[in-house]
Image: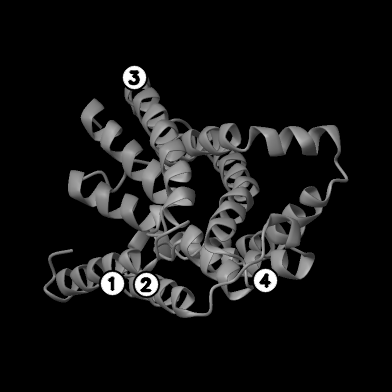
């Protein structure tokens, strides 16, 4: 993996982790474009580590409150919202890993993501803010996060859509979606780190890895901040159109045997 390829993959991970268009699906496409299908678990781990740093820094004030007061309402909401993903992820871990390797379903998954984004954006505008979120909202949104374990189902897309379904306004739906992503990303990094330790380190240059981490961190932070501000005045439908077009392109290439 060249330094340029590492930088581009870092940008892809950073932006698509928080834009509602699926980071896993885009990384799969990016690796195939560069012929890096076997780039390895270490690269995935480091790319996620970069976005974890970005989200922890963005929400540093919220997490300082949790550290100072572990029984804060926010702690409870994050725990409740994370439970579905933990249960589904551990129960079907091998199945989801196999699907992610083949990429056979990602075209359909992009289309599904677009459908959720379009439908959620078409419903009546909600007015609930962060202080209004209750455990039922957190559990509902967390259940949608669990469904995003499929490679090209966007985690941020589904959780933002779930927030809109529960009556959150767009800005708050994005804000809570990204906040809820922190335990999920941290858990993924922890599990992948254990696996990397077991299987050994792939032959990827340290400089390339550092570039990938830095790029995913910087562009992840930019994506979080931009997306929350974007949804104050704009809809999700442009993202729906994008993933529909991408999904149809992938399905077309698969049909022709070119992908």
Q: Are marks 1 and 2 in contact (CB under 8 Å)?
A: yes
- Give me the disc on residue 207: 3
- Give me the disc on residue 140: 4
Apparent side of residue 192 relative to residue 101 in the rendered image (left or right): right
Query: Circle 1 — which element?
Result: helix
- Residue 198 locus on image (x, y percent): 56, 37
Apparent side of residue 17 relative to residue 93 in the rendered image (left or right): left
Give neighbour class at mark 4: few <14, some 14-19, many 20+ (Cα, 10 Å). some
Mark 1 vs mark 4, CA separation in Å: 25 Å
Mark 2 vs mark 4, CA separation in Å: 19 Å
Q: Write down the residue under mark 2.
A: 114
Earlier along the polypeptide chain: callout 1 or callout 3?
3
Position of 17 relative to 135 (above/below): above
Between disc 3 and disc 2, the foreground one is: 2
Q: Write down the residue under mark 1.
A: 244
Quarter of the picture containing the C terminus is bottom left
Earlier along the polypeptide chain: callout 4 or callout 3?
4
């Amino acid at each position: 993996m060249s330094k340029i390829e590492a930088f581009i993959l870092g940008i892809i991970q950073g932006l698509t982790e928080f834009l509602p268009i699926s980071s896993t699906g885009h990384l799969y496409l990016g690796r195939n474009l560069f012929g890096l299908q076997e780039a390895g678990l270490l690269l995935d781990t480091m790319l996620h580590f970069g976005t974890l740093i970005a989200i922890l820094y963005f929400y540093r004030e919220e997490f300082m409150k949790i550290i100072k007061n572990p029984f804060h309402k926010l702690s409870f909401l994050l725990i409740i919202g994370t439970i579905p993903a933990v249960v589904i992820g551990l129960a079907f871990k091998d199945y989801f890993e196999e699907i992610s390797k083949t990429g056979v379903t990602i075209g359909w998954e992009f289309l599904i993501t677009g459908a959720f984004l379009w439908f959620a954006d078409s419903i009546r505008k909600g007015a609930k803010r962060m202080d209004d979120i209750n455990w039922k909202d957190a559990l509902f949104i967390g259940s949608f996060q669990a469904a995003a374990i499929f490679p090209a189902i966007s985690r941020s897309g589904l959780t933002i859509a779930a927030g809109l379904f529960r009556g959150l306004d767009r800005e708050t739906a994005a804000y809570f979606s990204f906040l809820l992503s922190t335990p999920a990303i941290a858990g993924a990094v922890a599990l992948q780190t254990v696996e990397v330790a077991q299987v050994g380190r792939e032959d990827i240059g340290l400089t390339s890895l550092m570039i990938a981490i830095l790029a995913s961190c910087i562009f992840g932070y930019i994506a979080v901040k931009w997306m929350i501000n974007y949804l104050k005045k704009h809809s999700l439908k442009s993202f729906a159109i994008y993933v529909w077009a991408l999904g149809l392109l992938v399905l077309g290439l698969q049909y022709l045997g070119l992908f």
